[in-house]
Image (tube, rainbow, N blue to C red):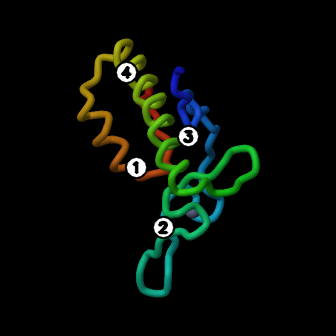
């Protein structure tokens, strides 16, 4: 007999995400003295696109990983068209901060 695999599905589905409306994708909210973890999105800055709810922590990690992979792929594709160093890209993004748009001017 072939052993049936128990547990999660073989293919993880990518759940569309959007920036958290509470922290505006910053993952933190401004407290009285300190920035606090955003409780709405588990301090990730992301929620489900369809219903705006936060994912469970385990799913969140998986989905962030999947979405990051997609994002990296898209960056790679852009990189092959634009002659720009990867470190330049990240420096630009960091200066603008999370949730900011990155306009490269091309
Ligand atoms: Zn949030």
x 59%, y 33%: residue: 9
Are the residues tagged 3 and 1 within 8 Å (C-beta)? no
Q: Are marks 2 and 1 in contact (CB under 8 Å)?
A: no
Label 2 vs 3, first from the N-terminus: 3
> Helix, strand or loop at disc 3?
loop
Q: Which mark is residue 28?
A: 2
Q: Is residue 23 above or below residue 59?
A: below
Pointer 4 or 3: first along the chain:
3
Disc assigned to residue 96? 1
Do tag 2 and tag 3 residues touch (Cβ < 8 Å)? no
The span from disc 2 to disc 4 (Cα, nearest Å) is: 29 Å
Distance from label 2 to label 3 (Cα)?
Answer: 33 Å
The answer to whether residue 11 is left or right of residue 65 is right
Residue 87 position within the rendered picture, expressed as x and y whole percent measured from the top left: 23, 34
Vertical side of 50 occupied by 88: above or below:
above
Where's residue 89, x and y in %?
Answer: 32, 34
Cα distance between the residues tagged 4 and 3 = 33 Å
Q: Which residue is mark 3?
A: 7
Residue 99 position (above or below residue 38): above
- The image shows residue 83 at horizontal and vertical percentages of 29, 17
Q: Which residue is mark 4?
A: 76
Observer-nearest residue: 103 or 65?
65
Q: Nearer the viewer, residue 36 or 55?
A: 55
The image quadrant of residue 92 is top left
């Amino acid at each position: 007999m072939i052993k049936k695999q128990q547990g999660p599905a073989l293919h993880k589905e990518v759940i569309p995400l959007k920036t958290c409306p509470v922290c505006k994708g910053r993952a933190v909210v401004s407290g009285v003295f300190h920035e606090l973890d955003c409780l709405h999105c588990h301090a990730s800055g992301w929620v489900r696109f369809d219903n705006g709810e936060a994912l469970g922590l385990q799913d969140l990690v998986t989905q962030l990983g999947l979405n990051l992979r997609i994002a990296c792929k898209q960056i790679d594709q852009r990189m092959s068209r634009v002659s720009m160093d990867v470190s330049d890209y990240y420096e630009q993004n960091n200066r603008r901060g999370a949730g900011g748009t990155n306009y490269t001017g091309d």
